[in-house]
Image (cartoon, rainbow, N blue to C red):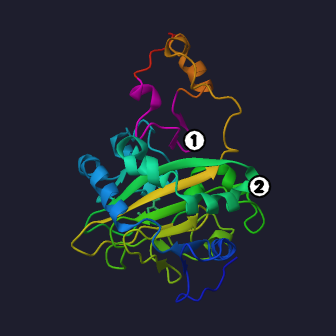
Amino acid sequence: MTVTINKSSVPHKVDFATPLSDVICHIKEDGAVIVRGFMDVETIQKLQEEVDTAVEKGSFGPRYQEYNEEAGEIPKHEIYKRGEGKKTKHMKNLALTSETFRNDVLNHKWMHAVCEQIYGEEFGDYWMNCAHILHLEPGEKAQFFHRDTGVYRVSDFRRRLNDPEFMINFLVSLTEFREDNGATQLIPGSHKWDAAHPPTFYGSDEAVPAILEPGDAVVYLGSLFHGAGENRSLDYRRGMIVSMHPAHFTPMESHFHLPKEIVESMTPLAQQMVGWRTMNNQNKIPIWQAGDDKIEDVLRLQHKEV
Ligand code: AKG
């Protein structure tokens, strides 16, 4: 199904005074909304200072460039095949790196009010799927259009128009987002499309850039086709995405509380069963990672020999 959109009016722009019911209507109808002043400029400045060194040190492009292609190690899914460009850095580990992220972002009242509306009735609690800094250097090409929910096969079984949403993303601008510096391109209404792929992977007449001042945010559904734009400017473009999904996608029992020495007496398979190891989805996309690394590597986890 395709939906005709008046490009001049979407995504709608709202602020904290806009009734939440209107905000939710825009998100459900268009798949996205822009909120002005999601964070104030001083807080954005502080966040920038906290993450700057880590972004500087971070590597460009997707991590799978380090994998052995001949051994079939490269994730096959479109998101990873086309993934991040060579002039893009996605910096993870925000809860470790940034006090502002821990204190301000994760407690953001409006963000939680939106999540509560999207998930509360259908799923109960929700939690963070991931959060990254999205940094584009000058000269970066446009990213391909994709759905962030593509990581999870189960999202293909949702009936697009009726079923509850599995992911909502808050992409906050840390610099200006302009048409010429790689503002995220969104295809409004595409969360309702049945297609698993966009009609074209790059460039679309139906796409609109999310133009943002530092501190604004574009809130979009994980099922909306979107991609970073081309950065034709002389400066970097930087944003921060916070992705939320239902707590439903979680085992009933957690094993964080197990003493490490008990976990280390277990086989790798048994460790994985209690959530102490990073896993892969069917396309070898790593899930349940520690930043960009495997949990077992970061924890230097020993295991029982098999
Ligand atoms: C992604 O990497 O999945 C994105 O959608 C990035 C969007 C952006 O950086 O504007």
* Residue nearest the observer in this picture, 45 or 217: 45
Q: From the image, give the main secondary structure of the stretch colored magenta.
A: loop
Rate crowding at label 1 as few (under 14), some (14 to 19) or many (20 or more) other CA atoms within 10 Å: few
Residue 221, label in figure: none
Residue 287 sits inside the magenta stretch: yes
In the rendered view, tell whether residue 206 sits above or below residue 58. below
Of the two numbered discs 2 and 1 in the rendering, the one whose residue sits closer to the viewer: 2
Q: Which residue is mark 2?
A: 122
What residue sits 69% from the left and 29% below the top?
253
Q: Quadrant of residue 118?
A: bottom right
Say whether residue 70 is visible: yes
* Residue 232: % across, % down: 27, 75
Name the quarter where the C terminus is drawn.
Answer: top right
In the rendered view, tell whether residue 261 sits above or below residue 82. above
Direction from residue 138 to residue 142 in the image, left or right:
right
Direction from residue 184 to residue 164 in the image, left or right:
right
Q: Which residues are magenta?
A: 277-299
* Residue 45: % across, % down: 30, 61
Secondary structure at numbered mark 1? loop
Q: Quadrant of residue 235?
A: bottom left
Q: Which residue is mark 1?
A: 281
What residue sits 59% from the left and 56% below the top?
149
Q: Earlier in the sequence, mark 2 or mark 1?
A: 2
Question: Which residue type carries mark 2?
Answer: Glu
For the residues marked 2 and 1, what is the alpha-carbon distance in whole angstroms?
Answer: 25 Å
* Residue 71: % across, % down: 42, 35
Q: Tally the marks.
A: 2
